[in-house]
Amino acid sequence: MNVVKRSKEIDDSALAFTTAVAAAAAIIVALVLPALHFYYVYQYNTGNIESKTEINAKQISQLIGHNPRMWEFETLRIQELLDDAARETYTEIQRVFAENGDLIAEHTTGVAPLLSPTIRDSHPLYDAGVIVGRVELERSLRPQLVQSLMVFVLSGLLGAGIFIALRAVPLRLLRRVIERASFLASHDALTNLPNRAVFQEWMTHTIADVARDGTPAAVLFLDLDHFKGVNDLLGHAAGDELLKQVSDRMSGTLRQNDVLARLGGDEFAIIQKRIAQPDGAAQLAQRLIAILAEPFDLSGQEAMIGVSIGVTICEPGGQADPSHLLQQADMALYRAKSGGRGNYQFFEEEMNRRLLERKTMEIDLRRALANHQLQLHFQPQIDLATSALIGVEALIRWNHPEQGMIAPDRFIPLAEETGLILPIGDWVIHTACRQAQAWPSLKVAVNVSPVQFRRGDLVAVVRHALEETGMNAGRLELEITEGVLMQDTDATIAILTALKELGVKIAMDDFGTGYSSLSYLRRFPFDKIKIDRSFIADMGRDDHADSIINAVISLGRALGMKSNAEGVETIEQADLLRAQGCEEVQGFYFGRPMAGEHIDALVQSFQNGDATAVATSAGRRAVADSTSASSKDDSRENDAAKGVSFSAPTAVAGA
């Protein structure tokens, strides 16, 4: 494996470096200490014999001064002077010579003849300033050399000890550090499981094994369900402990041949080899789902989670690489989560086709924003009491150059996932405010995505749009759903309050389809409640729907909030809503979503008192331009006009 190879390369480099340093230190100790010792001894002896020779010369010169003619014959006296100057600690010879070179006196200390090596020094003898002879001293350095050799032996032993110590101890510590660093580089520090890099290397080996042995292998991609809730409620320490327990449970479920890795966050992956597929992967997935559904004890707090698993099979003869296999398993995981979580799904080629379509649509959507392919259509809003046109709701359309009009329910969820909803939402707000300036008597409603609250600067965007277009803030109405409030209620209410301070109106859309509408109405003073079209469709046929509608209208009236009914398609529905006290309506009966020029005609018709005819005509023209006019039935078209997903309604910017 590459990680092991890199670790070995680092280990070899560290070994060579440590050996070089230890050897250098050992050589320095082994050679420098005896060399310094010998140098010190040599310098000491040299200085000693120089001073000793000089002293002897002065003493003999004084003797010469007393008897300059006969001093050569005072051998006994000279011998006594040399004897006084001798030291038994050295092996040396002192000699006195006459000017003609004759030896006058000699004194030996220690063993003669002297053993090499020796050092020698001489000093002249003077008589009234005239040289009459010389004193010479020769000393053996053999004893000092023996001492230096003994020092060399001891320092060599010391150097060997230093070499062993410097090479073994630091290398052991360094190897531990390298091993730890290598482990951390290849494993997750929290769970001690292999990380993504090691897992991909194992996948490379697995693909090779599959090609060689002809036995399929499975790759399982796991994502914990509700893990974020544990982190939010119990803290990150509890989340870390949960991940450790999860890894322990999964490790205990796997066979010795299986490989488990943590890819990051709450994502794990498994390679399952040498077992019949796909049955082996299915059985393993079922075991994992079962054991992870059991409660976890987190320091006395019980936590319940689950796991969703995507599975792909690596077949012999396949062209898959590690990244491709992980991508397939990830797509299967996405499908498992979409199916309600707590289950597993195998990868199918249809998933790959949908992924390619999704990627293509994402690219096209980015181009659409840059190339001005997005359009706004507007659906009329009618005051039931006066039958007056009082506002419009801005709804986004995508005029694709090849596919034609694309309904919002196809591209808005993708825009939310990719973050494109932020620039799209900004464009919708600015465009709606700019076009609404042509209709000074109308309000304009714009749907806002939860993503704009979480990731955008919605207040700044709205403020800039109002300032840029000069539109009165009271004419702009932002519609949100409960999905906006459920993420971070306090932060969202703070943003809504800031928008209200700008003068913007706030409406709660799709009221009654969530779970906490009443609590939200109590916490924030909405200006309008919009009754979901699902209730309107059953009016007059379902007593429960009639009761809910009546309750919502009464609740809005009691809280000082206007009520708006969506999806009104018949005069009977409009009459029933008027009788129950509903104030505003919108729907196909009063006008489908239409381009801005049709709204111009509609405004003019209301001013001329011919609202019904023009509204009907404009509605028919809008149908021709509408996204869903081609083949959808009326109820689905109304949903598409709203721009929401049929399976999971979500308010979106301008959708």
Image (cartoon, grey):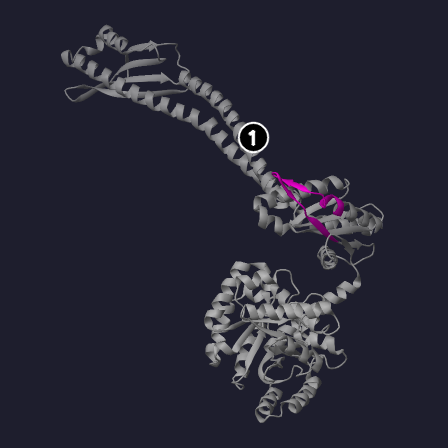
Residue sitting at x 61%, y 46%: 239
In the depicted view, which residue is nearer to us: 86 or 191?
191
In the depicted view, which residue is nearer to us: 102 or 142?
142
**Crowdedness of circle 1 by 10 Å Cα count: few (<14), some, many (20+)?**
some
Residue 530: image location, x then y, percent:
61, 72
- Region in magenta: 289-309
Q: What element carries label 1?
A: helix
Above or below, 645 relative to 466: above
Q: In this view, does 244 lie to the left or right of 470?
A: right
Residue sitting at x 84%, y 49%: 279
Task: Tell me the residue that label 1 is attached to.
Answer: 168
Residue sitting at x 53%, y 28%: 165
Image quarter for residue 45?
top left
Q: In this view, does 467 lie to the left or right of 579?
A: left
Q: Is residue 470 left or right of residue 431?
A: left
Q: How many labels does the image show?
A: 1
Q: Which quadrant is the C terminus positioned in?
A: bottom right
Residue 304 drawn in magenta? yes
Residue 285: image location, x then y, percent:
77, 48
In the depicted view, which residue is nearer to us: 48 or 33?
33
Image quarter for residue 88?
top left
Residue type at tag 1: Ala
Above or below, 472 relative to 3: below
**Residue at the extreme front of the image, as rendered:** 579
In the depicted view, which residue is nearer to us: 614 or 258?
614
Above or below, 155 relative to 197: above
Determine if residue 169 is in view.
Answer: yes
**Residue at the extreme top of the image, as rendered:** 76
Image quarter for residue 118?
top left
Residue 640: image location, x then y, percent:
69, 75
Residue 413 drawn in magenta? no
Above or below, 556 relative to 336: below
